[in-house]
């Protein structure tokens, strides 16, 4: 089900449009430190995990730099495509980690091979979800929004299942929920 979604160019265009909207809102708000005008300071990422060929714009991380001399602070808006500094796409980190709870070792190995991710990397992602993510102030504050509580031992699958809609809507809403930990100063937590 998700493999079809990840191979759908329209899904990736929708995610890119969400990122563009967030970038425009960030730019319109001005510099978070001094209120100055923000200039584009986008940079290219080399994300891993694409199942289809997409244009170069999909590898672009939106970011801004303050135009005020003496400030020059960077403002990086939240993203649905990139999970902080992780090399793999947010969709891949989320979905493979979510599938770890229900896949046999053999199927997980085949999936990881198809995407080109080492099983040790997948193990690190699992540790990140179970230890680092759950220790973040963001999760400690937002986990109280879910009743009954999200099963921490089954993250991210237990959290992903709390969002309504078809697979595409569910994943998009989930990635939007993670937005606060994907940009700006919060990226230091990675």
Image (tube, rainbow, N blue to C red):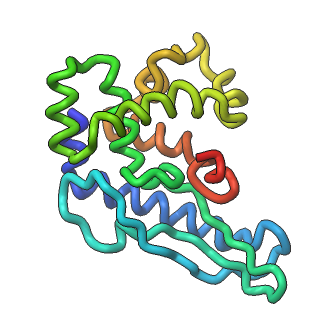
Residue positioned most to the front: 120
Whole-percent x and y of residue 70?
A: 84, 84
Above or below 146: residue 118: below
Relative placement, left or right, of 172 versus 147 is left
Residue at horizontal 20 percent and vertical 18 percent from the top: 104
Q: How many marks?
A: 0
Above or below 166: residue 64: below
Split into 4 quadrants, where in the image is the N terminus?
top left
Whole-percent x and y of residue 115?
A: 21, 45
Above or below 134: residue 189: below
Residue positioned most to the bottom: 69
Whole-percent x and y of residue 153?
A: 49, 15
Quadrant of res 185: bottom right
Relative placement, left or right, of 95 versus 181 is left
Relative placement, left or right, of 142 versus 107 is right
Residue at horizontal 68 percent and vertical 36 percent from the top: 138
Residue at horizontal 33 percent and vertical 40 percent from the top: 168
Residue at horizontal 19 percent and vertical 63 percent from the top: 53
Quadrant of res 178: top right
Quadrant of res 142: top right
């Amino acid at each position: 089900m998700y493999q079809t979604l990840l191979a759908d160019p329209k899904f990736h265009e929708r995610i890119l449009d969400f990122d563009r909207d967030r970038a425009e809102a960030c730019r319109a708000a001005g510099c978070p430190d001094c209120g100055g005008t923000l200039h584009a300071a986008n940079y290219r990422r080399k994300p891993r995990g694409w199942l289809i060929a997409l244009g170069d714009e999909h590898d672009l991380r939106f970011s801004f730099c303050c135009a005020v001399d003496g400030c020059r602070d960077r403002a990086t808006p939240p993203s649905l495509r990139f999970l902080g500094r992780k090399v793999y796409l947010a969709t891949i980190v989320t979905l493979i980690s979510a599938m770890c709870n229900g896949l046999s070792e053999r199927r997980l190995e085949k999936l990881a091979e198809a995407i080109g991710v080492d099983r040790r990397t997948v193990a690190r992602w699992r540790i990140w979800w179970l230890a680092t993510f759950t220790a973040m102030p963001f999760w400690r504050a937002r986990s109280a929004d879910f009743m009954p509580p999200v099963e921490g031992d089954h993250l991210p699958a237990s959290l992903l299942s709390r969002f309504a809609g078809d697979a595409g809507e569910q994943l998009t809403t989930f990635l939007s929920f993670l937005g606060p930990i994907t940009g700006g100063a919060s990226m230091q937590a990675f």
